[in-house]
Image: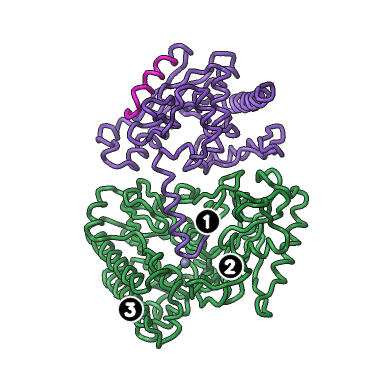
Chain colours: A purple, B green
Amino acid sequence: MKDKFDHLDKLESQSVFIIREAYSQYRDVALLWSIGKDSTCLLWLVRKAFFGKIPFPVLHIDTTHKFKEIYDFREKYAKEWDLNLVIAKNEDALARGVGPDTGKFECCNELKTVALKQAIAEYGYKALYLGIRRDEHGIRAKERVFSPRDEDFEWDYKNQPPELWDQYKTKAAEEEHIRVHPILGWREIDIWEYTRRENIPVNSLYFAQDQKRFRSIGCETCCGPVDSQADSIDKIIEELKITKISERSGRAQDKESDYMMQKLRSLGYM
Amino acid sequence: MSTDSRTVIVGLDGVPFGMLKKFGETGVMPNTHEIIKNGYFSKLRSSIPEISSVAWSSIITGANAAEHGIFGFIDTHPGTYSMRFPNYTDVKVKPFWEVARGESVIVNVPATYPVRPMNGVHVAGFVAIDFNKSVYPSQLVPLLKDMDYRLDVDASKAHTSMDDFLEDVDKTLDARIAAYRYLWKNQDWQNFMLIFTGTDRLMHFLWCAYADENHKYHELFVDHFRKIDVVIGEIVADLNENDTLLILSDHGFEGLETEFYVNRLLIEKGLLQFNPGTDPNLSNIAYGSKAFALDPARIFINQKGKYPEGSVAPEDRESVITELTAVFSEFEINGKKAIKHIYRKEDVYSGPYIDEGADLILIAESGINLKGAMGAKQMTGKGPFTGKHTLDDAFLLINKKIDAGQLPPTPSVIDAGQYIKSKVS
Ligand SMILES: [Zn+2]
């Protein structure tokens, strides 16, 4: 077991380093909390980095279509962890009736992307912490590599090129804020092992009920559960060790890749 | 410029300069011929590599790949060997319609899927998958479906029945024209962009029918261009004096003699290896491999720190480039050199995303089509394709003479994109 702890300790200290470094650079920062396992794990790391009290807001983009369990979780831990919780909604779009029934793309775009833009504009955040991971597939994986990796395929923050922060500044000019990904190098199983070790609260949606559980959670209408018997963190970790199904396969976005491959093949690519 | 001058862009995917000229002169495309006679007509240099996603992204943004971020149809997830398909959300520079004054109608531009809200109407092009994510605003979805609008020709049909394929090409064109006619009349617009992509699909499979007047599909091939010329005639008739019409292609085309499978050469030279007992695909690449190719012929050095099995130290990059350059420049097919240009990314790209580009990009000699084809058993071969893309002979046609200095003597797709941006903003 000692080895495992060393691995998690290393990930933790790398993430804490990035979290503190970004805060000292930008100050006007916020943590984007989707209330899923990754951003909750990130939130935990941020609490650790600042000794229990997060010195900046925690932003939740509320589409109003989240699972009830997500709202319950948010209220409970915002209070327990004394978070400066900022809830942002695209009120205009909601007033216009935008929702899953009016088209999933528009729904997602208006209620997530536009809502986030509005919040950034309103509160003037210069940097946002996001709990994305490199081994997630799908649309999020387009994020740039944060830093070079060493032989172990871990990223090595001490080996950052000096222009790292400059790179992020360049990006800021375009998007008007900087995205910081402190857990980019974590794998799904690392998240769970760390969650188990630290006793981080877990949303009940992740645990199997009636042979199904969610591997990633978001809006009620865009998430599908996967077949699973795992009703505890231990069982989830066991399941991850044997399964090869992609984490986001419950989400519609990745099925497109198969079609794209077929289309490209028919024209002689691939 | 008067504020009500409009800009219309018609794209003919893959159509080479010489073909348009010939179809003009031989009466297949009389309306186009009129514009050629009275306007600006030039060869246009495609992107590197010369494929639609990269080239159209340059045309709509005026930027090179290291700025707009689209380097091919396929890439790897950063730091891994797993495949990803870059799409419109990866385009880092705003397309002209997001900086233009007034509303725009954008129909079938490749690499603009999935759509996002914009000022006007946007119907995405290749590779568009889900209809609902291909049309903005979504209210137009039922209307387009009523027109039997098709996002793209089903090219897989060409692999089983050429007749079925041609029927699909024709129906797709008809529906595209119906959609354009509807939007042209019923939508407010300042800028209108309409791309025909059936041209590229036809040329891939039936260049042979174009080249041979006795080919049984020759007339069907030519008819496709006649139909497009009718649309060009309609558009010209509806233009005001101040309006600008640009007709252009994203790359050229020529006959295909041989396919050259670039990864096979890397394997035979010992530069690319797979773990013993595994399939030859990128996820099984063995430590020690120096390079691999992604389509069409983008060579990535398997660099330490960049890839999980990366084995080339950064300080050895130059010597590996030298080695690869020697391998490719010496390679011959039937006694003739196969590779015409070996571009280093530093020489052809500049911008913030240059790290994501391939280290070397190969351009073939005439008649040779380059493919990654990791699983290929031989170095060369021939599939169902009779035509292939070319770099130097896309075209740009504008309905008026151009003031000196507005475009360089041999413009590229990037120049065309910058010209478009200057026109619409
Ligand atoms: Zn093509």
Chain identifier of the residue bearing label 3 in the image:
B
Q: Position of residue B273 (x, y in %)?
A: 69, 55
Q: CA distance from mark 3 to mark 2?
A: 30 Å
Confirm whether the magenta stretch covers residue A254.
no
Q: Which residue is mark 2?
A: B370
Most foreground residue, B360 or B381: B381
Most foreground residue, A13 or A84: A13
**Residue at x 52% of width, y 52% of height:** B68
Q: From which residue to which does the magenta span run?
A: A64-77
Q: Is residue B265 above or below residue A251?
A: below
Q: CA distance from mark 2 to mark 1?
A: 25 Å
Instruction: Find numbered disc 2 in the image and state the secondary structure of the residue it sits on.
Output: strand
Q: Which residue is mark 1?
A: B63
Neighbour class for label 3 at 10 Å: few (<14), some, many (≥20)? some
Instruction: Find numbered disc 1 in the image and state the secondary structure of the residue it sits on.
Output: loop
Most foreground residue, A164 or A16: A16
